Image (cartoon, coloured by chain):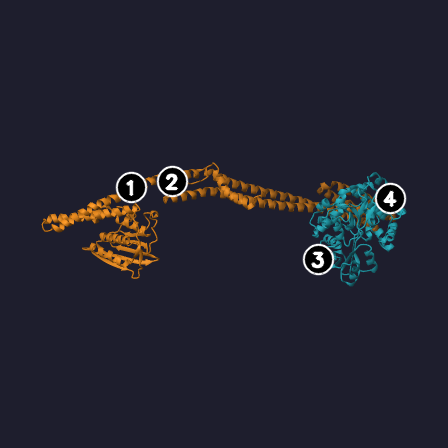
Chain colours: A cyan, B orange
Amino acid sequence: MGAAGVGGLLGLFANSAAAEPPPETRTIRMNDTPVLCFAPQLLAKTFLRKEGFTDVRRPRFKGMASRIEALRTGEIDILAGLVTDHIAGIDAGVPMVVLTGLHPGCIQTFANDRLASLSDLAGNRVAISAPGDHMYKFLSSVAANIGLDPVREIKWIVEPDFRKWPQMLENGQVDVVAAFPPQTFKLQEMKVGHIILDTTTDAPWRHYFCCMITARREFVRKYPVATRRALRALIQSIQFCAQEPQRAAGLLVERGITSNYDNALKTMRTVPYGAWQAYDPEDALRFYSLRLREAGLIRATPREIIARGADFSFHNELRQELKV
Amino acid sequence: MTRPSGLALLLSGLRWGPVWTARIPASINTKLLVAFLGIVMLLVALGAVGLGVLQIADERTAGLVQLERRVAAYRQLQHNTTGQLYAVASAFLAANESDLDTALRRLQRFAYDFDRAEFVARGDAERLRGIEADYAELLRTGTRIIELVRSGKIDAARSLHHESSIPLADRLERRTYALVNKAEADMVDSAEFSNEAYRTSQMVLIVASLGSILLALFLGYSTSTSLTKPVRQVRARLRNIARGDFSGHLEIPNRDELGDLAENVNRMSRKLHQLYGELESASRHKSTFLANMSHELRTPMNAIIGFNRLVMRRCKDILPAKHYDNLGKIAVSADHLLLLINTILDLSKIEAGRMEVHPREFELAPLLEICARITEPLLDGKRVEFVKEVEPALPAMHTDQEMIRQIVFNLLSNAAKFTERGRIVLVARYADDEVSIAVTDTGIGIPAEQLARVFDEFSQVDGSTTRQHAGTGLGLAISRRLAGLLGGRVDVESEVGVGSTFTMTVPARYRGPSPVENVPAEEGVTS
């Protein structure tokens, strides 16, 4: 990130960071997931350096399950991902702590003409990359919210290469496809199907964080200052994306995360990063836990999920501190 | 050191429970009362646990109902929030007085739903306050927008709507969603807690029931065993005493009436042992004395009989008939006396254990023939038919021939003695390695009440019978004892005025004596 690009934002939090002791560790490891809505995490390096992290590592993992597993094995410290994956991980006993929300509304669900709306989901074919993958969990929670049994009433079609999904939708091999940006733009450009769910605009999903930031429990316990500083850096990055969408898009292209500036900019403008200050991450966990439990994908109650795998004290402190 | 397993503990409990119960220094009544009281208390405790479980379930159900009401109220609030936003937005399109009034009325109606939500959700006061504040602001903004629309400032109204009303409504909606989520999560928790409480209660109830059943069984087992075991021991001990075994000693831990009973049985056993020893010694002395005396009497008696016969033979012609006749009477009396002495000698030998069995191989039929020939003269002058029914295929016997002969002769002579008319039937049969010889007569018969005593020494049906029919009254006693020595027995069936049947049953091949001591007087007697 160019110094001119983030200089102003860095100035906003300079005093708070300076008053704190240095982080207990200078090394931090985060997932490197090339999904555009994760831009705040992908662009956080400058903010992290400012917070005292001199060694920022970004190991790559294929699939969300392996990233959750990387938290368990200690290969990464901080993870940005879908809330439903985090909840399933907590339910499965992965030692992880949800710290805050990243943003609400980034997923769009496309359907062919067989479906007029979301309520027609029953009996139709939905593309997923693997049984029980991140889309399976998210769409199961959606199905549960409209009163469907995702296991019995939806036909899940497995295709590991998500880039083939638009074609499959066009060919009639599947009826429903859900995607993140930039995949959503590709579907829109291809004019394949129509949107039956947009979590940016449709209630109740638009009221909840869909992507959240999670840390390894041991990391949080062992390095509370580093956790707080890392979270501050990520929040600064979120604010940067919200306030400087063109610069953020430019940086995404500059760093090779995407080659399409327009798509990057569109993502920065449509994903409501600015909602971070107003939204309640606990409520997001509660809402999706309720739905996943209804879908039969987790056993723990929302209270147990929050008690076992969430710590919003950093979030609350930083919200007070970063009154933007 | 290894810990004892559950099974080992159970076995140990089963082993020691009755012992501990027996050692409790209390009466049987008290023990039984305490045991039953214990079981009743367990049932009461079980009932109390069950009632407690029901009460918890009832409380949880009431809580769930309350939560359901809360969710319903919040959902209504959620629904109406969206409705109000729609009403305000549609007012811009309509812009007529009627729709504007409706929009305003709908905005104000929100207050009722809010009051209801506030009533059922006192626990969410903070969140509700936030909603209330947002709502007040929304109402103000909505009213202002409608005023702008009424005054024809549509652009200003739209601007206010986009800048204030929509974000406000959005926040209000989010807050009501949060309320619903919170209430739903509470309900899930409550339901989960109820399930958990139900499972725990179920486990508690099962464990308490099983524990109660096991404890009741243990109490029952310990109490009953502490009572029945000593009773069985006492019964076995008494049976042994009845058999003449005084050597044992009851070891019973009971400190109740049964303990006293056992002690008394032990004391009685010791006393009986002492008395039995004394009796045995006296009996042995008596038998020895009788044997010696009989032997000593027999020698002069033989001399008397011998010399009397000599005098009768040599002086028959010179003695007056009356004197000769008197000598004959002396001979008869002397023979009878000698018979009596011989019989007493036999009985004494048996009692003193000096009668020895000399088994040897012989044929039974010739022996029965001899006995019959000896008996036939006894029937002279009587209208009695003597019948023999001897099985032709009788096997050779291997036992004491003389004892068999003596028994058969005793039975036949008894029959001849007590039968004046009719018939005497001698029957011999072989079955199952045993030979039975039955003598049936049509004599006077034996009354039922006296039947049990016919095998006693010096016993006849009554004194007059002895006098009328002569005899020592020892024949049947000796016969039964001889049969016992040969490993057999003598049974009797009789009916007064009809006749009697005496049956000797002995093994064809001698195997040893019968336990005659154990045969009660009544055994083998049928009237």
According to the picture, the residue beneath numbered tag 3 turns out to be A153
* Residue A10 badge: 4
Kindly report which numbered mark, 3 or 2, lies closer to the viewer in this rendering.
2
| Residue B149 makes an appearance in the image | no
Report the amino acid beneath label 4.
Leu
Question: x%, y% of residue A189?
Answer: 84, 59
Q: CA distance from mark 1 to mark 2?
A: 24 Å
In the rendered structure, are the residues bearing label 3 and label 2 in contact, judged by CB atoms less than 8 Å apart?
Answer: no
According to the picture, the residue beneath numbered tag 1 turns out to be B285
Q: CA distance from mark 3 to mark 4?
A: 50 Å
Same subunit, labels 1 and 4: the answer reads: no
Question: x%, y% of residue B481?
Answer: 30, 49
According to the picture, the residue beneath numbered tag 2 turns out to be B269
Q: Which is nearer the N-term, disc 1 or disc 2?
A: 2
Disc 1: which chain?
B
**Residue at point 29% right, 62% down?**
B392
Question: x%, y% of residue B39?
Answer: 52, 42
Q: CA distance from mark 1 to mark 4?
A: 132 Å
Tell me if mark 3 has few (under 14), some (14-19) or many (20+) residues whose alpha carbon lies within 10 angstroms of its own: some
